[in-house]
Image (spheres, grey):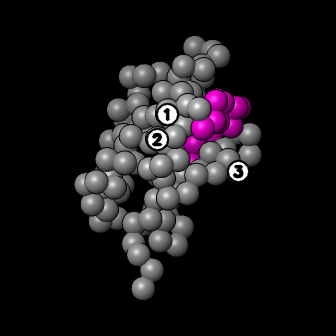
Amino acid sequence: MDDVCLNLPLKSEFVLIARLVSSGYSARLGMDIEKTEDIKVVISEILNKCILAEKTDDQKIDIDFSIWENHLVISFKLDEIEEIVGKNGSDDLGYAIIQTLCDKFEFVSSRILKVRFVFKEDK
């Protein structure tokens, strides 16, 4: 399946677009509704944290959807995303929700966050 890349303004009115793309992408992978809803919640939580920390009016975020082995991988690219999303760590409800709903959650660098969701069990 082809990768999909979004470059969205970091504004609340564009969260819906990212959620719609994730829903369509996960449907094409054959993911069930429950997993699709988990993905949409994670996207909303991450984007809302980034929007609240927005530093300029014209800031944008890159969101890439790709497949790696049996995982849907969603990468968020934004300067200082590690500081923004990981800010209060385990004391933060949004952070806890993100970590709970993802099958894997990792900061690749200070500006790249990757979340993974299993869409097909290994045989």
Q: Name the residue located 53 percent from the left edge and 23 percent from the top edge.
A: 51
Give the amino acid at mark 1: Gly
Give the amino acid at mark 2: Ile
On the question of residue 103 being in view, the answer is: yes
The secondary structure type at the circle numbered 3 is strand
Task: Name the quadrant of the N terminus.
Answer: bottom left
Q: Which residue is mark 1?
A: 94
Among the two numbered marks 1 and 3 on one chain, the one whose residue lies closer to the N terminus: 1
63 in relation to 105, above or below:
above
* Magenta residues, start to end: 74-90
The secondary structure type at the circle numbered 2 is helix
**Percent from the top left, x then y, of residue 95?**
54, 37
Task: Name the quadrant of the C terminus.
Answer: bottom left
Which of 24 and 107 lies nearest the eye of the viewer? Answer: 107
**Percent from the top left, x then y, of residue 74?**
51, 51
Among the two numbered marks 2 and 3 on one chain, the one whose residue lies closer to the N terminus: 2
27 in relation to 37, above or below:
below
**Percent from the top left, x then y, of residue 54?**
60, 19
The secondary structure type at the circle numbered 1 is helix
73 in relation to 97, above or below:
below
Is the residue marked by circle 3 packed among few (<14), some (14-19), or many (20+) residues within 10 Å?
Answer: few
Which of 6 and 80 lies nearest the eye of the viewer? Answer: 80
Which of 30 and 6 lies nearest the eye of the viewer? Answer: 30
Q: Is residue 6 left or right of residue 60?
A: left
Give the amino acid at mark 3: Val
- 1 or 3: mark nearer the eye: 1
- 2 or 3: mark nearer the eye: 2
Q: Which residue is mark 3?
A: 108
Q: Which residue is mark 2?
A: 97
